Image (cartoon, rainbow, N blue to C red):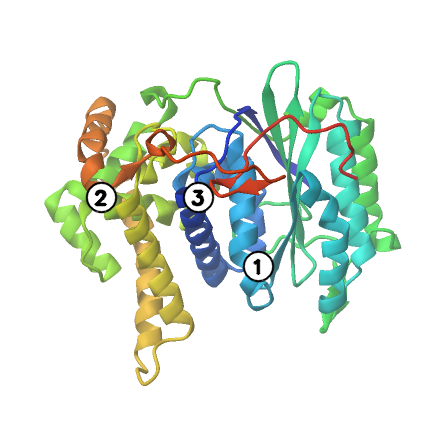
Amino acid sequence: MKRSGIADLPLHGGRVPQWLAERMTRLGTAITETIIHDYGTSAFLSRLSDPFWFQALGVVMGMDWHSSGITTSVMGALKRGLAPRAHELGIYICGGRGRHSRNTPHELRQIAERRGFDGEALVRTSRLTARIDNNAIVDGFQIYLHSFIVTSAGEWAVVQQGLNDQNGTARRYHWHSALVRDFVAEPHSGIVGEHQGVIMNLVDAQAEPAQTAMLNIVREHPEKTLSATRHLRMPARHDVRASDVDLKRLGAVLAVAYERDLHDFTELLLLEKLGPRTLQSLALVAEVVHGAPNRFNDPARFSFALGGKDRHPFPVPLKTHDESLDFLRTSLDRARLGRPGNTSDQAFGKEKLDGLRRLERFVRTVETGLKPEADFDAIIKHEKAISPSLDGRSVFDDKRARPPRRPDEDKRGPRLDVKPGPRSLF
């Protein structure tokens, strides 16, 4: 076991508007299902435990590219979206922000009882990861969000976030039960069991390496521990700049979307007649699903899929958001079930999903072979010009009266980050 990464983010307050929260739930669920369909739950946990990939996921779903609210909104969206199909997909998300985090032990015990593995060991692991990041690592951050993700095989990941009152920043911590070497490898570690369910027991003699690793983390100086992990640092400014983006990678995405010959070929890859703006979005979604780990060191680039709620780099294009989701959702549903009386429907759905993989490979080929470079200022100008035609929307366009507040959510969507109370999460 190891902590797999850390992200430092400027602290943002407010809420995700309902029109975006609902779309994030549907799109995040579809992306997760696509990854599980192609690579399995283990690979999804491996991605989720990488701070750069996690940030790219939140950005491609339409959240602001650098906000600490990505953690709250992404985990909330995934928990809501995946819960109805948790047993079918074999993945469960427990905990959350504030009072929801304190429900984690109860949720884990319920899942363990149904799946046949050691719930008390998972509860102990949950508490240890929270306490290590909250207390053993004395870095000034107080944990206020704790999400524990566990598969039906007993493999787990943790995403949690802390607040630093003094400098107004948030720090996100990622954990994974495996020693991750590759995003698509089988990274199980210290898990044994029978067919009816994998048994995880961190106090078993065979778990001594995991116990030793935890003790070593506690004993090490915080700076050494933090420097040994992947560390994402986001700036305090809101605007996206050319220096934040790999312009060659973005240029390849724009080329396959807007260059006529490449656009026509891309349509063949996807077996779908799509407009250039939707192709641009799907190309970045495809990279989140299929891209290699080293492709996510510039998460701001993924804001060019669906913009951001605060208009950075441009308002969320609702038509494009819905068209991209429709492509994914339709492909997944047809690949999974097909339509009654149509035996070729399932195969067609799988072919459309495979089109995303081909699209990601094609963009990389264009990037390597043609080396296009995006004109950053021009693409921003273009996106803002076409925004009205795509139903571009931001939080600044919402003029509704403020509804009554509830502890964690109101009609405008899930809360983001506010100062946590003094009560301990665990």
Residue highlighted by disc 1: 83
Residue highlighted by disc 2: 277
Query: Going by the picture, which residue comes out furthest to the bottom?
Result: 341
Q: Is residue 247 left or right of residue 266?
A: right
Between tags 1 and 2, which lies in front?
A: 1
- What is the distance, in whole Å, between disc 1 and disc 3 at their CAs? 19 Å
Q: Secondary structure at mark 2?
A: helix
Q: Is residue 177 left or right of residue 259?
A: right
**Residue 18 image label:** 3
- Report if residue 120 is visible in the image: yes
Where does the C terminus fall, quadrant-wise? top right
Q: Residues within 10 Å of mark 2 (few under 14, many from 20)?
A: many
Q: Residues within 10 Å of mark 1 (few under 14, many from 20)?
A: some
Q: Secondary structure at mark 1?
A: helix
Where does the N terminus fall, quadrant-wise? top right
Between tags 1 and 3, which lies in front?
A: 3
Question: Cβ–Cβ below 8 Å for labels 1 and 2?
Answer: no
Q: Amino acid at mark 1?
A: Ala
- What is the distance, in whole Å, between disc 1 and disc 2 at their CAs? 31 Å
Q: Residues within 10 Å of mark 3 (few under 14, many from 20)?
A: some
Between tags 3 and 2, which lies in front?
A: 3
- What is the distance, in whole Å, between disc 3 and disc 2 at their CAs? 24 Å
Residue at horizontal 22 percent and vertical 42 percent from the top: 390
Q: Residue 260, how many percent across, how many down? A: 11, 45
**Residue 138 image label:** none
Nearer the observer, 89 or 53: 89
